[in-house]
């Protein structure tokens, strides 16, 4: 009886104290809770194995990337036709995603460090060299990619992994 009272008392003390890193209670993970934590939280939208967020506020490319980073993400990368089509559904105007070749002309990479393989450039693009070295999707009637000045102020799409 005394032992159980002591036990209850210690649980009570633990449960009313603020969780701290290393607290053994924090390490108990309910499988249902764990699954919920893997979903994208609004306004992030789930597609395939990642979460996307369309931000309508016009920003330069670097400000857009920094904005994504404050939310734990990066400007979006695209790795398939299906992903390009899905992201086009999120935007009605020219929009920043994470492609850039500002470091070295024609050495395109994604700001989320994933491999740059699929390309959906407009017919004569990219044509801007170092002067136009940030990737804008949803350009013109063809809704294709164009390299434009990074100072252009566009809406943006962020990505983060689940
Ligand atoms: Ca261009």
Image (cartoon, rainbow, N blue to C red):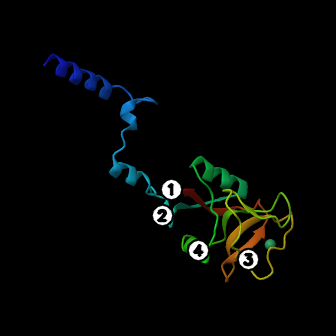
Q: CA distance from mark 2 to mark 3?
A: 25 Å
Q: In the rendered image, which residue does mark 4 sit on?
A: 88
Q: Dot 1: what SS?
A: loop
Q: Tags 1 and 4 in contact by the CB under 8 Å rule?
A: no
Q: Earlier in the sequence, mark 2 or mark 3?
A: 2
- Residue 159 sits above or below residue 34 on the image: below
Q: Dot 4: what SS?
A: helix
Q: Tags 2 and 3 in contact by the CB under 8 Å rule?
A: no
Asked whether residue 157 is in view, the answer is yes
Task: Please tell me whether mark 3 or mark 4 is closer to you in this view.
Answer: 3
| Horizontal relation, residue 58 to residue 7: left or right | right
Q: Tags 1 and 2 in contact by the CB under 8 Å rule?
A: yes
Residue 96 percent location from the top left of the image: 67, 64
| Horizontal relation, residue 108 to residue 157: left or right | right
Q: In the rendered image, which residue does mark 2 sit on?
A: 46
Q: Quadrant of residue 102?
A: bottom right
- Residue 30 sits above or below residue 129 on the image: above
Q: CA distance from mark 1 to mark 4?
A: 21 Å
Q: In the rendered image, which residue does mark 3 sit on?
A: 121
Q: In the rendered image, which residue does mark 1 sit on?
A: 162
Task: Please tell me whether mark 2 or mark 4 is closer to you in this view.
Answer: 2
What residue is shown at x 63% (from left), y 70% (from top)? 79
Q: Dot 3: what SS?
A: loop
Q: CA distance from mark 2 to mark 4?
A: 15 Å
Question: Alpha-carbon neighbours of circle 2 within 10 Å: few (<14), some, or many (≥20)?
Answer: some
Residue 70 percent location from the top left of the image: 60, 47
Q: Earlier in the sequence, mark 1 or mark 4?
A: 4
Question: Alpha-carbon neighbours of circle 1 within 10 Å: few (<14), some, or many (≥20)?
Answer: few
Residue 84 percent location from the top left of the image: 61, 74
Q: Dot 2: what SS?
A: strand
Q: CA distance from mark 1 to mark 3?
A: 28 Å
């Amino acid at each position: 009886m005394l032992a159980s009272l002591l036990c209850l008392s210690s649980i009570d003390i633990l449960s009313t104290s603020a969780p701290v890193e290393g607290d053994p209670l924090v390490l108990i993970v309910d499988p249902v809770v764990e699954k919920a934590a893997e979903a994208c939280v609004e306004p992030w939208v789930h597609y395939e194995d990642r979460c996307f967020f369309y931000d309508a506020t016009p920003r330069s490319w670097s400000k857009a990337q920094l904005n994504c980073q404050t939310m734990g993400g990066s400007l979006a990368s695209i790795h398939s036709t299906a992903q390009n089509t899905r992201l086009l559904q999120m935007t009605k105007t020219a929009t920043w995603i994470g492609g850039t070749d500002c470091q070295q002309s024609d050495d395109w990479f994604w700001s989320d460090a994933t491999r740059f393989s699929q390309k959906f450039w407009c017919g004569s693009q990219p044509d801007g060299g170092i002067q136009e070295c940030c990737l804008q999707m949803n350009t013109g009637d063809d809704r294709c990619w164009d390299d434009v000045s990074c100072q252009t102020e566009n809406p943006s799409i962020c990505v983060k992994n689940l």
